[in-house]
Amino acid sequence: MAAMTVSSIDIDIALLQQAKELAGTPSNRETLDLALRTLIAVRQQPAAVERIIGRSFVPDQIDAPTRTPDASGSSS
């Protein structure tokens, strides 16, 4: 688990409540944690896509079989 600290911040309570409802999180702490993690992931995503685009693939990887999810959403 990452190090945690207690912090006092001014925050728009209406925005926090809306985020809690949208995220389905039970506490302010969980809502803010999810919001921070989501922001970081979204901002890092373009760099990850660029790394994938720039990667060299060998023929075995290119011709690898694909798996199609069944109706329940799990892959088979």
Image (spheres, helix red, strand yellow):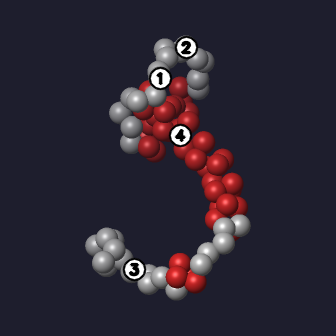
Residue 28 visible from this viewpoint: no
* Callout 3: SS: loop
Residue under label 2:
8
Mark 3 or 4, nearer chain start: 4
What residue did someone put label 1 on? 3
Q: Please name which of the two marks, 2 or 1, marks the residue nearer to the observer.
A: 1
Q: Amino acid at mark 3?
A: Arg
| Side of 49 where 62 appears, left or right | left
Q: Nearer the viewer, mark 3 or mark 4?
A: 3
Q: Which residue is mark 4?
A: 37
Q: Amino acid at mark 1?
A: Ala
Residue 24 visible in rendering = yes
Q: Nearer the viewer, residue 13 or 61?
A: 61
Q: Position of residue 42 (x, y in %)?
A: 61, 49
Q: Quadrant of residue 54?
A: bottom right
The residue mark sitting in front, 1 or 4, is 1
Q: State whether residue 20 is above or below residue 67.
A: above
